[in-house]
């Protein structure tokens, strides 16, 4: 099994480029099911979860190809199998996003209950209740969701989510795009990835308004057409590299990412004493964010909440920063009940963290110490990489398949910034410290 080995204590400096966002790319790929015309995607990240979704589409009969530049072509005109089998879905919760599009396009679907990171229950109840309100008949048995639409087409409905759900909002928005009548989603997710999906569906001919707010209106159309779609920047990846620069005492710039995707995160960094500069341009490709350490960071309290609040996907990384900040910070997790599994591993590196339910109190120390640690989920693995960059000595992170689900070429990008990092596999044991200048 692969591991990542880091020799800490080296300030990171330079520039990296943000990849396309995994959490935006996955629903965009699922949206291809809604049309029998080709869809072309740009800025698609090379990640394990993306490979899983592409494999899932191909398993349903779609013609899918991807080049080295992140361009993906999907043609679902040949799709005949409206199923998402356990063998694929067990590795990725986002594969449940095919349920709504399959019902809208084919009137039937059989989707395995999903797997993924063990950070909480994340039930599909709200997805299923919404689809039932739109006319679907659903049975859950033997680990599968079996759904049909007796009327042939879904119909519009007013759906109020009990709590904000990103994938639930995306699933029902896609289903409603081809439904008869108007669908209103209340208490909808406002994340940038939801807006990216709505923009993409509009490019395919959908009638959607209100995305980016808590009320989204979808007026169903009879069919959608193909389109050229672009995945937005991965704000979580970008923030992770900015945090890597700060925790190492360096100066890092991330290109091709808009600062307004990270308002809450950047505000907390400024509160902690970091120097934050942004360059927002009319084109995403010209935008950038720079974070520079100005001495030791100060402790800052955070509480995760749905967008535009502090992202739960950055809680673990921010905790790593607070482990070496001056003073004590309080970190409260309100989204997922099991998203503190990285705490025990950070403690192995000397971090002083006390847990009480969904609250962690972090007492900053001067320096962490390298140690063997184990990744428990995607964002936890990122926090351990950050801790390793700041630690004295060597850190060995096992179970890094988690990080491969959400970070494209992480060792290469960190190596470009000056990190001493390598991946240990059965086939290679070479340090990745590029001789060329940072991109």
Image (cartoon, rainbow, N blue to C red):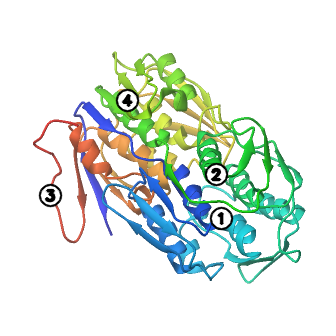
- Disc 4 designates what residue? 286
Distance in Å between CA atoms under marks 1 and 3: 45 Å
Q: Residue 37 at x, y = what percent?
A: 57, 66
Quadrant in which residue 151 is drawn? bottom right
- Disc 1 designates what residue? 34
Q: Nearer the viewer, mark 2 or mark 3?
A: 2
Quarter of the figure that contains the N terminus: bottom left
Closer to us: 205 or 113: 205
Q: Residue at x 12, y 40 (%)?
A: 436
Q: Nearer the viewer, mark 2 or mark 4?
A: 2
Query: Which of pointers 1 and 2 lies earlier in the amino acid sequence?
Result: 1
Crowding at label 1, few (<14), some or many (≥20) Cα neighbours within 10 Å? Answer: many
Q: Residue 431 at x, y = what percent?
A: 16, 52
Secondary element under disc 4, as helix, strand or loop, is helix
Secondary element under disc 1, as helix, strand or loop, is helix
Distance in Å between CA atoms under marks 2 and 4: 25 Å
Query: Which of pointers 1 and 3 lies earlier in the amino acid sequence?
Result: 1
């Amino acid at each position: 099994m692969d591991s990542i080995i880091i020799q800490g204590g080296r300030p990171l400096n330079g520039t990296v480029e943000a990849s396309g966002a995994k959490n935006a790319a996955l629903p965009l790929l699922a949206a291809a099911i809604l049309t029998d015309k080709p869809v072309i995607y740009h800025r698609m990240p090379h990640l394990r979860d993306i490979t899983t979704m592409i494999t899932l589409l191909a398993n349903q009969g779609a013609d899918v190809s991807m080049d080295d530049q992140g361009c993906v072509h999907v043609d679902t005109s040949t799709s005949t199998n409206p199923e998402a089998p356990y063998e694929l879905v067990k590795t990725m919760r986002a594969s449940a996003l095919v349920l709504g599009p399959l019902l809208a396009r084919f009137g039937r679907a059989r989707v395995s209950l999903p797997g993924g990171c063990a950070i909480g229950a994340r039930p599909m109840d709200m997805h299923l209740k919404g689809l039932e309100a739109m006319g679907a008949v659903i049975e859950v048995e033997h680990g599968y969701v079996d759904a049909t639409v007796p009327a042939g087409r879904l119909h519009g409905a007013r759906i109020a989510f009990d709590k904000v759900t990103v994938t639930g909002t995306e699933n029902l928005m896609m289903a409603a795009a081809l439904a008869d009548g108007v669908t209103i989603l209340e208490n909808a997710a406002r994340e940038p990835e939801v807006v990216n999906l709505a923009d993409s569906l509009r490019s395919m001919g959908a009638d959607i308004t209100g995305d980016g707010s808590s009320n989204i209106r979808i007026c169903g159309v009879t069919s959608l057409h193909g389109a050229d779609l672009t995945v937005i920047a991965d704000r979580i990846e970008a923030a992770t590299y900015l945090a890597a620069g700060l925790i190492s005492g360096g100066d890092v710039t991330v290109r091709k990412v808009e600062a307004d995707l990270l308002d809450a995160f950047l505000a907390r960094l400024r509160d902690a004493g970091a120097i934050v500069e942004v360059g927002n341009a009319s084109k995403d490709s010209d935008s950038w964010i720079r974070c520079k350490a100005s001495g030791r960071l100060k402790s800052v309290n955070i509480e995760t909440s749905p967008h535009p609040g502090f992202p739960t996907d950055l809680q673990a990384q921010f905790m790593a920063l607070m482990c070496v900040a001056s003073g004590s910070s309080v970190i409260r997790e309100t989204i997922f009940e099991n998203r503190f599994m990285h705490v025990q591993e950070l403690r192995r590196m000397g971090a002083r963290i006390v847990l009480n339910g969904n609250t962690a109190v972090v007492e900053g120390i001067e320096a962490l110490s390298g140690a063997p640690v184990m990744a428990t989920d995607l964002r936890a693995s990122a926090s351990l990489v950050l801790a390793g960059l700041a630690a004295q000595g060597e850190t060995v992170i096992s179970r890094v398949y988690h990080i491969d689900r959400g970070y494209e070429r992480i060792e290469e990008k960190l190596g470009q910034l000056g990190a001493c990092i390598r991946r240990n596999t059965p086939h290679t044991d070479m340090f990745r410290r590029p001789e060329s200048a940072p991109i």
